Image (spheres, helix red, strand yellow):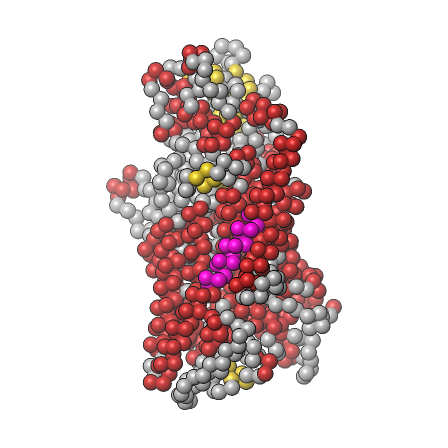
Amino acid sequence: MANITKKVSWSSRADESGATGEGTPLLNGSEQPRYSRQDSLRGRPKEIPHNEKLLSLKYESLDYDNSENQLFLEEERRMSYIGFRCLEISRWVVCGLIGFLTGLIACFIDIVVETLAGVKYLVVKENIEKFTEVGGLSISLILWAVLNSAFVMVGAVIVAFFEPIAAGSGIPQIKCYLNGVKIPRVVRLKTLVVKVGGVICSVVGGLAVGKEGPMIHSGAVVAAGVSQGRSTSLKKDFKIFEYFRRDTEKRDFVSAGAAAGVSAAFGAPVGGVLFSLEEGASFWNQMLTWRIFFASMISTFTLNFFLSIYHNNTGDLSNPGLINFGRFESDSVAYNLYEIPLFIAMGAIGGLLGALFNVLNYWLTIFRIRYVHRPCLQVMEAMLVAAVTATVSFAMIYFSNDCQPLGPEHAEEYPLQVHTHTHTQTSASPCMVLTSSLTTSSCLLCFFFFLFCADGEYNSMATAFFNTPERSVRSLFHNQPGTYNPLTLGMFTLTYFFLACWTYGLTVSAGVFIPSLLIGAAWGRLFGILLASITSSGSIWADPGKYALIGAAAQLGGIVRMTLSLTVIMVEATGNVTYGLPIMLVLMTAKIVGDYFVEGLYDIHIKLQSVPFLHWEAPATSHWLTAREVMSSPVTCFNRIEKVGTIVDVLSNTSTNHNGFPVVVHVAPGDEPAKLCGLILRSQLIVLLKHKVFVELARSRLTQRKLQLKDFRDAYPRFPPIQSIHVSQDERECMMDLTEFMNPTPYTVPQETSLPRVFKLFRALGLRHLVVVDDQNRVVGLVTRKDLARYHLGKHGLEELHLAQT
């Protein structure tokens, strides 16, 4: 265990159950780490040491490979063809439920955000009206900042103190889960409740965030819960879907939940499937693709249907997702061949800006890991960001002279005609004209568009800042040329870029999708305006809305580095396939340029938490390494018939904390190493000890019930810790026969196998343990996820990470 270093990670406190390795993960870290005795003697250090050249030992793998022991094979052989067909139908039912519930959650978030935002804008509006007449507009600014900070404080408190894993978008954690890493508490019911409450508070609090990213995490939690047919948090078992209580099935459903989340957020079912394929699922088959697509479609339809009821247009299914980019008409989105190089150049700009965003956020996250690790400090930082965001927005509008005339085409968009304070005069009473087609909150929101402008004019800086990010994106895409001043767009891009960078990583539930799109749309529109100004007068080929769309794609691609899924999401969200090719070229360019400097945002955050994440391929220059060099040895093995005391002592040894044990048979006395005959897991041994499956008891009690696979499923996923199982001194002398419960056919490799070959076998089959044997099938080592993940390609060739008990 070289270089043992402590640092805060996705863990914030010990699990209530006291189970080993069940700490609460959190992206930004949220606790005082456990210090060694020497640390406590010296006094607590002022900062937490950070070293990203570490790989955490506290993360375990999921058991994606089924343990084909005698119990499993007997159950499979007893099951008829009809039974298998019923299971297949059950999978479709579960996917339908996942889609339905994810759509309902998205609908709930949308309605609550709109209602609370309406209340907030009403309070601020009345306050501004009051103080506009008597002077003292600073009171309104303070009220605005306090309201924002109050909402954000609630969101930050529930995350920091109740469930820290709910911070951020949740996409890095779900990526790790689908990669095969067990991130504790990531798919719990409590996490979902805090996630939903947190994202509502952070969006209403005016932070530079979106509610789309957390929908992916929410969908994954729904999937993990529904597929198990019970809630371990509520201790309620519905006695359904018991066959799916294992990691193999659960991970497939979680990938469906993630896809349903994308589908609900963007109204992009195909994009959701491709997101799950590109960013999440490590294991895939054709039927799984169909089931995930079904869940995505149900999710979009559910959200659509219930929002249509809420907006009194029952049956109108024209708003498929939480964000609707508006429809780009074919004649307005035409593009020529000579514009392709311009689009590629925009992709390069997006890659550069994305890399800058990621680097800044990387250093900011390290600062947070080291210094902002107490929950109270995290809440204070979130409130500070909320207050600064409100102040900057207000200041930008106050000092902006970008007042545009209110034309007839804006009547729908700005239904509130308000006479308010201008730079030169103070006008009297405001009068409101509400259009029935718009909701209260959007109408009240429009009030701010007329701040500090003369009658019959609106402030274009206010349309960018005092708007929900989704509506700002839509206005940048579709507003007429000349709506925005280039200086306004430049200032907005600059300020929002740094605000979004500062906001991502706070202890609040928030996504980075919408802020990225908004930054990109702003500089993309600016690019289009500048292009039109340098060409011949009256040229209409440089439509700024078209370049806003390309800029939005370039910026998001430069930050998160998605290609295939993002292309389809953008095409589906805009409702026009015309821009498929330019968006694809832009995203590819952004990814290539961005990857030259730094990794994508999600990969950076995964690496900062020292998660043993396995990429698609082994490092390019690793062929010279063999299984003998990467394996862990010596291996703790059990005999086929083992003494109970020995098993208890091995499982209780906290210094090793192994989860898989080869079962061996000694051919000759003193034969070392012994021959492999199977593999048994810690979780299986704990269930056997709990039910006292001992050879002596089986002989003495002929009526003892035979242990079934159901007993193992009932204990899943929170197997009790070994400390909670009482074994008497007499029972320690008993023997346990592992033959029936071990997997007699574990995957093995010879010790001369190259690392890429071992990696491919391990990754493709979703293994947790790979036994290394010699030419006589004797156990010489064991390969786990951490043995493979610690080799990666660095700036100086192949590098090896140190393992640390973080």
Which residue is at the front of the view, 44 or 660? Answer: 660
Above/below status of 327 relative to 135: above
- In this picture, residue 205 sits left or right of residue 304: left
What residue span does the magenta drawing correspond to?
A: 98-113
Which residue is at the front of the view, 213 or 553? Answer: 213
x and y percent of residue 420 in the render?
43, 84
Which residue is at the front of the view, 2 or 525? Answer: 525
| Residue farthest right in this picture | 337
**Quadrant in the picture for the N terminus:** top left
Q: What residue do we see at 51% from left, 22% from top?
A: 741
Q: What residue do we see at 44% from left, 69% from top?
A: 118
Above/below status of 475 relative to 776: below
Which residue is at the front of the view, 89 or 197? Answer: 89
- In this picture, residue 108 sits left or right of residue 86: left
x and y percent of residue 629 in the render?
54, 31
In this view of the protein, can residue 614 be seen by the observer?
A: no
- In this picture, residue 333 sits left or right of residue 8: right
Above/below status of 365 relative to 668: below
In this view of the protein, can residue 457 be seen by the observer?
A: yes
Q: What residue do we see at 50% from left, 54% from top?
A: 105
**Quadrant in the picture for the C terminus:** top left
x and y percent of residue 92 in the render?
61, 43
Q: Is residue 777 magenta?
A: no
Q: What residue do we see at 49% from left, 10% from top?
A: 669
- Give the number of marks: 0
| Residue farthest top in this picture | 669
**Based on the displayed image, in which of its 4 quarters is residue 131 positioned?**
bottom left
x and y percent of residue 300 in the render?
59, 56
Q: Main secondary structure of the magenta part?
A: helix
Q: Is residue 103 magenta?
A: yes
